Amino acid sequence: MLRAAAAITVLFLAGPFPASPAPRYVRTIAHIAPPPVTLIDAQGKPVPLAAVLDYPGPIVLQFIFTTCPSVCPALSTALSAAQPELGERARLVSISIDPEFDTPARLRDYARRFKAGPQWMFLTGSREDVDAVQKAFGAYRANKMWHEPLTFLRPAAGEPWVRLAGPLGAAELVAEFRRLR
């Protein structure tokens, strides 16, 4: 009887249980000044980063590399699964952090693997330009194997970015996207 009373007391003092688990990621607001660089898209065409980011609608941006064994496939899987909910108005951008290996052809294969829709852009470029973009977004790591799972969202051109640091599933990504509005 005393054990039952003690257990009830502990539960009472612990307070109510949370309605849902805490997110596995950290959400912050980031003011980013992207560098004036030109990257290469999956068709091999030069694309000024400013033209990609001056898009008037919402953008979801991630840094990936096609041979990544863990973080990148998880990020890309979440983005792939979220595509229908994000809608055609959202621009999705994946920038390779391994430009020496990730050629436009490899990016096209990666895009097919993750069933990328027409609104999803895959970009690579010179080492210097890709590093400059990563540094502007606070995502640069000297070794690609040390990169973090980062997702950046922006509601419209000129607005601050939302930085999501940590693992993120499709449902969490869609919920964060809906918070932008």
Image (spheres, helix red, strand yellow):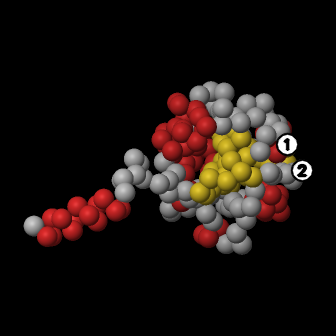
Question: Which numbered circle lies on residue 102?
Answer: none
Q: Residue at x 89, y 50 (%)?
A: 36
Q: Which residue is mark 1?
A: 50
Q: Nearer the viewer, residue 93 or 5?
A: 5
Q: CA distance from mark 1 to mark 2?
A: 7 Å
Q: Residue at x 55, y 48 (%)?
A: 76
Residue 96 point in image, percent of width and height: 68, 55
Q: Nearer the viewer, residue 163 or 40?
A: 163
In the image: residue 104, left or right of residue 76:
right
Q: Quadrant of the N terminus?
A: bottom left
At label 2, counting other C-alpha atoms closer than 10 Å, the crowd grade (few under 14, some 14-19, many 20 or more) is few
Q: Please tell me in which quadrant of the rendered image residue 6 appears.
A: bottom left
**Disc 1, SS:** helix
Q: Is residue 12 above or below residue 121?
A: below
Question: Which numbered circle lies on residue 36?
Answer: 2
In the image: residue 146, left or right of residue 167:
right
Residue type at mark 2 is Pro
